[in-house]
Image: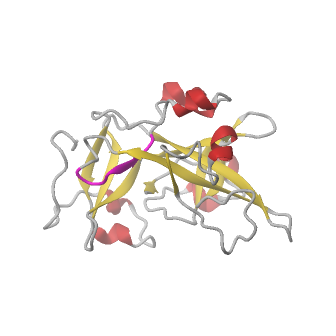
Amino acid sequence: MRGAEFRQTPREEARKPDLLRPRWNIGPSQEVMVIRRHPATGELHEDPLVWGFVPRWAKDLRTARKPVNARAETVRTSAMFRDAFGHRRCLVPMDAFYEWEGEKPPRHPWAIARRDGHEMLVAAIWDGWRDPRSGEVLRTFAVITTEANATLLPIHDRMPVIIEPAAVEAWLGNNADAAGGLMRPAPDDVLRAWQVSRAVNDVRRDGCELLEPVAEAGGSQPAAGSRG
C-alpha cells in the first residue's frame, strides 16, 4: 500500500520541511506522518515514522524483516506484533492509497479513496528500536490489513483497516480488546476505486497526475457501485 498526500503537521516545519509538501506516491522505508499517543504523556502527536516495522527487540537492523503490513487476524498473537498492538497503536492519515490488480505482470494499479471525499485514517502499529552503538531511536510502523470488502475484492483480497473518526479514541486508547473489535473491512459503500497509470509503479514519480483516472487495456472493472 502506498498513501497519497498524507496530512502533515505544522510543528514539524523546521525539522522536516520535505514532509510538509503534498505527497502522491509513498513507498516502504520512507518517512510518513503518523498519529500516535506519546508514550510518556499520553497526548496525541503527529510524528514522522518510517514505513517498515522493526520491533524493539530486533538485534540487527540490517537483517530485520521490516514488514510494511500486519494481518488483523494475527496481529494480536504474532510474536512480531503483539506487544505493539497492545501498547503502541497508531493511525496513518491519507487521502487515497494504491492497490494492484492481478498476480502476474503487468499488474494494473488502482487508486482507492473515501466516497465522501474525507481523509482516511488507517490502522497501524508502531515501535521504537534503539541502536546499541549510537543510542539513537528508530521509530517505525506497519499498516494493519484485513479481508477485502466487496468494493476491493475484484482488485485484491486484502485492504487496510480503516478507523472511522468516532472510533479514534477507542483505537488509540488503553483497551486492546476494544481496539481489536475495530479490525474489520470497511462497509461496501464507504470506498470508491478507479484505475490509474502504471507510472505509480515508480516511487520516484510523485505528482498529482498519478491519481488521474485512466482506462488501460486488459484491466478489469471493479464490482458494481465501487467507482465514484
Percent of width and height locating residue 167: 52, 27
192, above or below 128, in the image: above
Q: Is residue 45 left or right of residue 159?
A: right
Percent of width and height locating residue 88: 67, 42
Reply yes or no: does residue 90 show up in magenta.
no
Can residue 153 be seen? Answer: yes
Q: Nearer the viewer, residue 2 or 71?
A: 71
Residue under the image location 56 percent in, 31 percent down? 179
Percent of width and height locating residue 190: 32, 34
Q: Is residue 42 left or right of residue 149?
A: right
Q: Nearer the viewer, residue 5 or 120?
A: 120
Q: Is residue 56 left or right of residue 222?
A: right
172, above or below 198, in the image: above
Q: Quadrant of residue 223?
A: top left
32, above or below 119, in the image: below
User: What main secondary structure does the magenta stretch of the protein show?
Assistant: loop
Reply yes or no: does residue 157 show up in magenta.
yes
Residue under the image location 43 percent in, 66 percent down? 206
Quadrant into which the N terminus falls: bottom left
Color theme of the render: secondary structure
Quadrant into which the C terminus falls: top left
Residue under the image location 68 percent in, 45 percent down? 83
Q: Quadrant of residue 214?
A: bottom left
Residue under the image location 81 percent in, 38 percent down? 40
Q: Which residues are magenta?
A: 154-161
Q: Quadrant of residue 99?
A: bottom left
Q: Is residue 208 left or right of residue 67?
A: left
